Amino acid sequence: MIKKLNYLRRIFKAYLSREESQLTFWHGTPEVNFDSVYDKIGPYYMPFSSKADYAAHLDENGIPMLDYHGAVGLQYNPIAIAQFGLGNYNLFTKTGETSRLDLFILAADWLVANLEQNQDGVWVWNHYFDWEYRDTLYSPWYSALSQGQGISCLIRAHQETGNENYLAAANNAFDSFLVQLDQGGVTYQDPKGYFWLEETIVDPPTHILNGFFWAIWGIYDYYIYTSDPRAKDLFDKGVKTLVANLPGYDTGFWSLYEKSGTRMFMLASPFYHQLHIVQLEVMHRITGIDVFMQFKDQWQSYREKRLFRYYALIYKVIFKIFYY
């Protein structure tokens, strides 16, 4: 009960107060970056402009830290640092401002310095705080999402500078996608043979959708930069998984955040529903596969219906009360 009350206090402060919180960083407006190209490494697929300008909490070196409030407090988050870097890279390619390049390199250097081997010898970016997922993620924990976005940042840093440290770190981070969850990696093959990229390392896996998309973009970037056939194979397997399983994320009125395995669905929040729509459009631009655009249009139509938005929000609140 005390754990539940502490969680509710922290969430109330983050979501309902006017104080800066981790949401200051995460909850910008999801958008497609229309400056991106898809046959070579260039501007990242989402602009992340507001994340590039994040200034709520920076350490003495200018690296962003997120305030989760409560017992979690102020923390480094590898995903946020990668997105901060990618946002500044996008602005550098757009404006040519060297200050943006400096911030991008700052993030890339942090990623190189903080990539480390886990208990199984797999190179990962650890999160050094407990996180109240349905099953608590205990420090240190790692994620396919941070692996993918870290790789996307480092590949661009190597292309821009030629510094081999960036490519070496990207190579090490990529290896995590070649290893299953039970051996210290971030991938899972289900009984039907589908290949999943797991944002959270829990048993059974929950297949968080937005994390899968961002992780597979890292694999795609690695492939088009290195021509590594292993990355092409993983990317193709991931696309096959998404195409076959997207219908299972469609409730008929909203998208699912994950396959929670609970009696109630784990619906996406309004923010994550919009993020799914953007990610589906990017996947269509990368692959040309029509099913991604079909679901993008379908989920956009749900978002435009006020009744569906209200029902999804109420359902989500009830789910949180019972399962978190």
Image: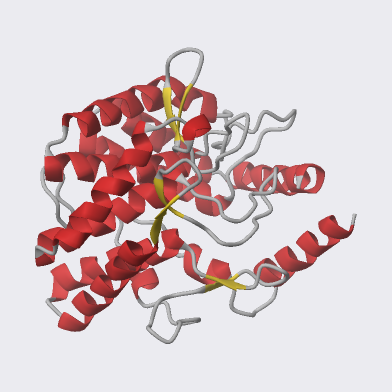
- Most extreme residue toward the right is 1
Residue drawn 38% across and 41% down? 213
Q: Is residue 174 visible?
A: yes
In this view, 66 is above or below 132: below
Looking at the picture, how far across and down is residue 81, in whole percent? 39, 66
How is the structure coloured here? secondary structure
Looking at the picture, how far across and down is residue 306, in whole percent? 60, 47
Query: In the rendered image, which quarter is residue 31 located in?
Result: bottom left
Left or right position of 144 against 96: right
Name the one closer to the observer, 43 or 101: 101
Residue drawn 34% across and 53% down? 149
In this view, 148 is above or below 163: above
- Most extreme residue toward the bottom is 60
- The quadrant the N terminus occupies is bottom right
Q: How many marks?
A: 0
Left or right position of 254 against 18: left
Left or right position of 307 against 150: right
Name the one closer to the observer, 71 or 256: 71
Looking at the picture, how far across and down is residue 251, in whole percent? 58, 29
Residue drawn 35% across and 47% down? 148
Query: In the rendered image, which quarter is residue 261 located in?
Result: top right
Looking at the picture, how far across and down is residue 194, in whole percent? 42, 20
Q: Is residue 300 visible?
A: no
Name the one closer to the observer, 143 or 91: 143
Name the one closer to the observer, 247 or 312: 247
Residue drawn 43% across and 61% down? 78
- Most extreme residue toward the top is 192
